[in-house]
Every structure is written in C-alpha cells, then in structure tokens.
Amino acid sequence: MILITGARGQLGSELRYLLDELGTEYVATGTNELDITDAMAVSRFVSELKPDVIYHTAAYTAVDKAEDEGKKLNFEVNVDGTKNVATAAEKVGATFVYISTDYVFDGQLKDAEYEVDDTPKPNNEYGRAKLLGEESVMNNVSKKFLIRTAWVYGNYGSNFVFTMKKLAKLHSTLSIVDDQHGRPTWTRTLAEFMVYLVANEGADNVPYGIYHLTNDSDKGGITWFDFASEILKDSDTEIVPVSSDMFPQKAKRPKYSVMSLSKAKKTGFEISTWKDALMGMQNQID
Ligand SMILES: NC(=O)C1=CN([C@@H]2O[C@H](COP(=O)(O)OP(=O)(O)OC[C@H]3O[C@@H](n4cnc5c(N)ncnc54)[C@H](O)[C@@H]3O)[C@@H](O)[C@H]2O)C=CC1
C-alpha cells in the first residue's frame, strides 16, 4: 500500500491523479485525516496501514509567513511533522520520499549549478526548517529518496502561473523580477519522477539519497521574468523586467538557485524542458 501525505496540496493532488491513471492503489491523507504534527496519531495510522511507500508531500509552504507569525508552525510541520512521518515509516520498513527545496541554498556560494552534495546554507526560515526535515529523514530512515525541487506549479493549487494569468487580465503592464535565477517545476514532472524512483528502487543507477529535480533549461536557469514572459506570450500585457529590490519580501530568496539535474538524469528519467512542461500543464485540463 502507498500513503500520500499532503493529499490536497499541489503535488499531493497531482500524485493522486497520476496514481489513478496508473491504476495504483493508495491512501491519501490531508490535515483533517492525519495531522502530521500529532506524533501519536501518525505512529498509530502508519503502523495500522503498514504502507510499503510513503510519499510525504505535506508541508508548511508559506515562505514569508514563516519569518514571523508562521515561524512556530513552519517548524512544527516541516521539522517535527516530517520526523513523525519518517520515524513511523522506518518502523514499518516503508520507502520514504521526501520533498525539499532549493531554498536550502542561499544562492551566494557560487554561480555554477548546485550539486546534490553541495553544503546547504539556507537564508530563510522555511529553508532552515526544510533542511532540518532533510536531516531527520537522512538520520531516521533506511530507504529514502529526498528530492529538492523549486518554483512548483500545476493545475491543483495557487501558484505563479495562475497569478500571472490573473494579473494579466487586470493590468496592461506587469513588472516582474529578473534577478533571481532558478528553474520551474511542473507538479506532473515531479510526481512522475517520484513514482519512477520508487518503481526502480534497488537499481544501480537509482541509489537512495538526495536528488535535484526541476524542469530543464539551458545552463544558468531562467528568471521569473523569463517565466512570466512565456506564460503570457499570447497576452497583450507588457512585461517589464525589474530588480527584486522593487518588491521587498519578508523572506530572503536566493539570487541563484539553479540545481544540477545530472543525478536525476543518470537514473534514466527523462526530464522535460520548462517550456514543454508549461505547455503540458496548460493542455492538461482542457
Ligand atoms: N510550492 C513550491 O514552490 C515548492 C514546494 N516545495 C515542497 O514541495 C512539497 C509540495 O509542495 P506543494 O504541493 O506546492 O505545497 P502545498 O502547500 O500546495 O501543499 C502542502 C499540503 O500540506 C498540507 N499540510 C500542511 N500542514 C499539515 C499538517 N500539519 N498535517 C498534514 N498536512 C498538512 C497542506 O494542507 C497542503 O495541502 C512540499 O514539501 C514543499 O515544501 C519545494 C520547493 C518549492
């Protein structure tokens, strides 16, 4: 049996639909069915279900709120909650798939792509909590895949793609940040990669440990301005590149968090380009 946490989030929803398509059975829980911060409840639930695989997508993802009013909840969900699920997974011998973030890097180290074994150094609270979550998984679980991803979007939740489309209907000009470099990730690509790793578990080219997975682009990644320009390429709205100083945010974002996809590619998984992925998302629900 498969357990999905965070079932109604962007990624949890995509994963459910993918497994439905594949005809794979699973149990999916959101906060109402299983609050991951409740250690007793998690332990009981997992020991009764005895899943072979846990896709742990539940997380506190409000990056700016995590700097102040959400600080406590960020750690409760992303650190303690992850530890609860990880410990329960190990007790039943489940394979554990944890999703982490490019925000474990501060973007200051270098301007080459981040490799999976580069030393993380988060510069915001969300990144710090997700990194502690990673450490908890590394230390507590034997069979684990940790996947760092970035700029996640899909058809099931709010995200940059929907925000841009909404704003373009209201404004003739949009100013978009052009000095943060990264790579976007379609939830479908990520969900397929998660399923692929588990399906190929044990193969020589699919070792346990940390992976980076985003959609692909030329070296150097893209900026939010590039992403917005592609999203709105058929719109009359003008997109103006600006510096992130124009939009002060509570949480610091890395200026450069392009992650190397070479380990993910070595598994044999084919990663679509960010433009193809965006088109795929837009064609997914017609
Ligand atoms: N959204 C993004 O841009 C990025 C997301 N990630 C990671 O990817 C994973 C999936 O993210 P999304 O699907 O975009 O997030 P999301 O915010 O859409 O979904 C997270 C889900 O977790 C649930 N949740 C929160 N607290 C919970 C609790 N105490 N018990 C049970 N469930 C709880 C929420 O209700 C929500 O449905 C997360 O681990 C996130 O940290 C990593 C990098 C970027």
Image (cartoon, helix red, strand yellow):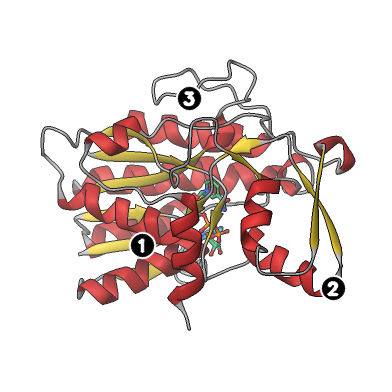
Q: Is residue 188 above or below residue 143?
A: below
The mark total stands at: 3
Query: Could you say where residue 183 lies in the image, as x and y percent from the top left?
Result: 53, 42
| Residue 28 percent location from the top left of the image | 37, 69
Q: Residue at x 45, y 71 (%)?
A: 33
- Taking the spot 21% from the left edge, 59% from the top edge, the residue there is 50
Circle 2 packing at 10 Å, graded few (<14), some (14-19), many (20+), is few
Q: SS class of the residue under badge 1?
A: strand
Q: Say which element carries label 3.
A: loop
* Whether residue 235 is visible: yes
Q: Which residue, given by chain and number where applicable, does mark 1 sit on?
A: 4
Amino acid carrying label 2: it is Leu
Q: Specify which label sits upstream in the sequence, 2 or 1.
A: 1
Residue 240 vertical position relative to residue 104 in the rendered view, above or below: below
Q: Which numbered mark, 1 or 3, is in the foreground of this view?
A: 3
Q: How many angstroms separate mark 2 from mark 1 (CA)?
A: 37 Å
- Residue 279 position in % (x across, y down): 48, 65
Return the residue nearer the eye: 69 or 169. 169
- Is 8 in front, or is 170? 170
Tell me the residue at 44%/47% (across/down).
Answer: 215
Where residue 246 sits, quadrant-wise, is top right
The label nearer to you, 2 versus 1, is 2
Image height of 193 relative to 212, above or below: below
Task: Check disc 3 and report the residue beneath it.
Answer: 114
Look at the numbered disc 2 and give the secondary structure of its residue: helix
Q: Which residue is mark 2?
A: 170
Which quarter of the rendered picture does the N terminus lie within?
Answer: bottom left
Residues at discs 2 and 1 in contact (Cβ within 8 Å) = no
Q: Earlier in the sequence, mark 3 or mark 2?
A: 3
| Circle nearer the N terminus (1, 3) | 1
